[in-house]
Amino acid sequence: MPGRRRPTRRIQVGKVAIGGGAPISVQSMTNTDTRDITATVAQIRRLAAAGCEIVRLAVPDQEAARALAKIKAQVEIPLIADIHFDYRLALAALEAGVDGLRLNPGNIGGPERVKAVVKEAAARRVPIRIGVNAGSLEKEALAAHGGVTAEAMVASALKHIRLLEDLDFREIKVSLKASEVPLMLAAYRLMAEKVDYPLHLGVTEAGRGLEGAVKSAVGIGILLAEGIGDTIRVSLTGDPVQEVIAGFAILRALGLRQQGIELISCPTCGRCQLDLDAVAARVQEELRGIKQPLKVAVMGCAVNGPGEARQADVGIAGGPGFGLLFRHGRPVRKVKEEDLARALVEEVKRLAAERREQ
Ligand code: SF4
């Protein structure tokens, strides 16, 4: 269990608090065209249903910025506008009512433009994430630190931070993403010593599927276990809902968030008495929407199953042609093999409903 968390300031992204002891939040980013309001709203709703707490959208042009107001009116989850280079897009996004900006003030064309954006963000109490990416460091930072190093990344972020602080703006969070895990670890650790702003963790361009999720889990998980990090985004190629699932899996694994179902399923061995993978997959899918923290076990045999999953709230253990349904490690009843997944799902939903009523 991770110990003490690094103390930070607290900022507010809409209804979600970040830092200062707030629960570590899970973010994602849409990969629809932001100008396509229908598709973007549909994707944000799917993300929210998966538990996503903050969604970022790319804002490449004025049409996308204008779409933000219409999108915002149709969703409840806080939205962050991702802006590069054009301060007018930042102003338009603020006008549209976004809850956060992701922008690097040193890249938007001079002090007057920074001042205009910061004034508007401050008036609306909208925080700004400074997002430094190892792949796009400024020439000066690279030259001063001998290439892409943690020091160069931190120096770049500090330069952007100072621009905001000079305008007395401190509603800031910071990310220092790299696709190399050791580099991102070093950058975040260094930054954690220098400022008390909350940190947004991520491994950028982590890849796809299992490999991308593992890479993200290593980078994000190590820092979280050290007490560093206040909000996370797992970046995966493909459906962003997978990012949310991976994000909560990381937080659950570290005991930092308890939301939703934790599936305990055995790796199977020669004693396995059922098509465990199919049952586990169905159970996982059908219980995706449950918000109560529950441990659900799917075990291959009755010899070790209930014992191995004693800490589970509900579980099944395979037997010859049937399975044993158990609750808190104690057998409840026998169920025919073909009905096992359904019986388990029903039992979990029943327990979730009971917990809701308590
Ligand atoms: Fe093997 Fe049974 Fe353990 Fe699964 S629960 S790994 S089938 S002994």
Image (spheres, helix red, strand yellow):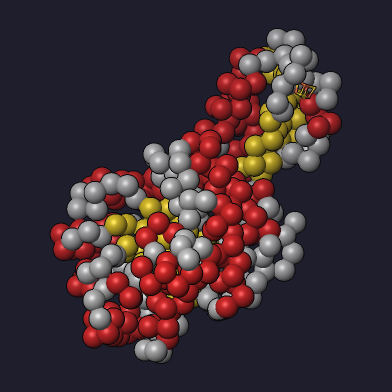
Picture quadrant of residue 139: bottom left
Image location (x, y in percent) of residue 222: 65, 55
Above or below, 92 against 177 in this view is: below
Picture quadrant of residue 343: top right
Above or below, 119 against 32 in this view is: below
Front residue (pair 290, 50) = 50
Quadrant of the drawing holding the N terminus: bottom right
Picture quadrant of residue 282: top right
Front residue (pair 180, 330) = 180
Tally the marks: 0
Q: Is residue 253 visible?
A: yes
Q: Residue at 53% x, 37% y: name it.
A: 211
Q: Is residue 240 left or right of residue 223?
A: left
Image location (x, y in percent) of residue 281: 56, 27
Above or below, 339 against 131 in this view is: above
Point out the quarter of the image occupied by ligand 1.
top right
Q: Residue at 33% x, 75% y: name it.
A: 105
Q: Residue at 50% x, 41% y: name it.
A: 212
Q: Residue at 24% x, 53% y: name it.
A: 34
Q: Is residue 50 left or right of residue 278?
A: left
Q: Is residue 353 left or right of residue 130?
A: right
Q: Is residue 355 left or right of residue 240?
A: right
Q: Is residue 292 visible?
A: no
Image location (x, y in percent) of residue 112: 23, 85
Image location (x, y in percent) of residue 8: 59, 76
Front residue (pair 49, 347) = 49
Name of the residue lying farthest toward the left? 63
